[in-house]
Image: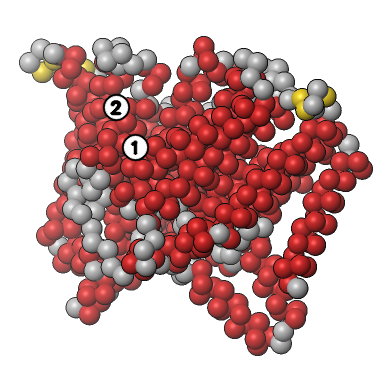
Amino acid sequence: MADFLQLLIAGLATGAIYALAAIGFTLLWQTSQTINFAQGEFVMLPAFFALVAMHWFGLPFWLSALIAIGCAVILLGLVFKLVIVDPLIRQGVLPLVISTIAVGLLLKDGAKEAYSAEAHRFPSIFPDRLVDVLGVKISLAQLGVLAVALAAIAALQWFLAATSTGRQMQATAQNPGVARILGVRVERMVMLTFVLNAALAAVASLLISPIYLVKFSNGETLGLAAFVAAIVGGFNQVRGAIAGGLLVGVIDNLAGAYSGLIGVSSSYRQAVPLALLVLVILFRPQGLLGRREERSV
Amino acid sequence: MRSGLAWAAVAVAVLALALAPLGLGRYDVYILTLWLVTAVAALGVNLIVGYAGQETLAQAAFLGIGAYTSALLAKAGVPFGLAFFAAGGISFAIGLAIGFPALRVQKHYLAFVTLAFSVFVWLVIRNEEWLTGGVMGLKDIERPSLFGASLRPHRLFFWFVLAIAAALTFAMWWLVRSPWGRAFTALRENPVRAESLGVNVRRYTLLAFAIGSAYGGFAGALYAPLVEFIDPAPFALGPSLLFLLMVVVGGSGSFAGPFVGAAVAVLLPEWLRFAESYYLLIYAALVILMMAFCPTGLVGLAGRLWSLRRRPARMAEDEGARALGEAKP
């Protein structure tokens, strides 16, 4: 039971990080029809920015982390929107989808060529100490990660629901035409979504890197986790992405530990979230918290 | 008249290809064969992407399924013909099985399901060592023999692959020209309208995906005896993404597109040898530029240049604008 609780907390911690990546992915999909296949690379890259700031310029960790978030907002938010998405959305959805796949390749190989192909350690924000809570040993680092990720999610939810800008963003996501008539500056809201996505990805990157190490090929796993989380939760809902992320994280961790019990080799751990994806698509295609979407002619 | 000219052009191209190995060295013939195999798999992607308007991120996985199926059957002593059709058949069946749930939902779900499937196939190939040899791969895959003569010599094997690729290409040509194929085009242009005209969108899209995947399996059955050694690497997610990119670079929805795209994907790494590891970076950047300025791919670009030459400049501009307009969904 104590083991189970430890696994559950570890799972919630990674799951909350997946949720951050999935929320950004969902927001982009809703507000600008951008299905970002480079989302995994967006989470992989900011840690490299931090490594560059620390090891090439000798800056302290806290400053490097802030620089990483800043670089992510500029490059993965503003530049991505202006240089890639804006010219390509005019050509249609397929060219844009293809281009995000190409952007993913570009970032992945760019990180490999510019920095290195090896996995790098990444400093943790929180001390890696175990604390005893009612007889259960819990990692302080995991609790910290969970707290930061949940705080980011709560702040985002508050921003979307309680501020004027946030509500304008939601309006843009739901119906850009009507939003424009009502005086919402749709273009600005879409841009804000890209900036938010980049910031969330950067936070996810800084949180996940001490756990997964920093490696150029991490985007594949992280991207898949984000896609699965978004679809499992129901991609037309931000809270769907949150629930999906937590669920994928927990299932992933439990599968790693208990795979023997259900008769699956631990080398198939990666396949468990995929099985979850298939089950959801088969039995609840709109996602666990999603609504069905109507089509128009 | 026009179609007569097109047939003559095709005949000349096939003849030139058939004669090409006579003047080429061993490695060049290998590259040319690899191009044909890649083009067969790309033909399948083009059916899925260019005609049915879906996205597949699993063609390399189907290539792997075909390659391992044919290699394992060949090792068990099954004749190549049977192994070849088994490779295609299994890929077709798996295509149906994963396409069915994915296509029930909405447009981009097939992309995510095939993405997940790619990862899963790679896990199976890597982990099931008793069957696939794991990361060590399968060695000494024999090339088939025809009428008692071994196709081991590289030129003979090239001609063998050329004949099969030509047959598969013809089958695909027939498919997209048939009423059945016209229905694909209808549903790519406007799925809801196509449905109201009596096209069963789900069934057509599903069959397009399964047939396209079967072409991946067929290509795999040719790939294994070509390289004579297979391991998990060429069947991972990365190569699947490259298959999608190459078809779009060549020109998705145009019949020649996959051949042009496969040529770029197979030959560019050879030409860009000096750039070595930067090859993928250059390729990815080219793809983005291509999508931004000419989403109809190289074939579309060639068509635009051709009409520029033949018509007054103003008309050509209109033509270009029309082509761009058509690319929109």
Q: Amino acid at mark 2?
A: Asp
Chain for mark 2? A
Badge 1: few (under 14), some or many (20 or more) residues near its Cα, within 10 Å?
A: many
Image location (x, y in percent) of residue A46 = 42, 43
Q: In terms of depth relative to the viewer, which is nearer, A39 or B144?
A: B144
Q: Earlier in the sequence, mark 2 or mark 1?
A: 1
Image location (x, y in percent) of residue B143 = 74, 24
Q: Which residue, given by chain and number where applicable, does mark 2 sit on?
A: A252
Chain for mark 1? A
- Picture residue at 33% right of the left edge, 56% below the top: A29
Residue A225's disc number: 1
- Picture residue at 29% right of the left edge, 27% below the top: A252
For the residues marked 2 and 1, what is the alpha-carbon distance in whole angstroms?
9 Å
Callouts 2 and 1 close, C-beta under 8 Å: yes
B310 left or right, relative to A1 = right
Q: Amino acid at mark 1?
A: Ala
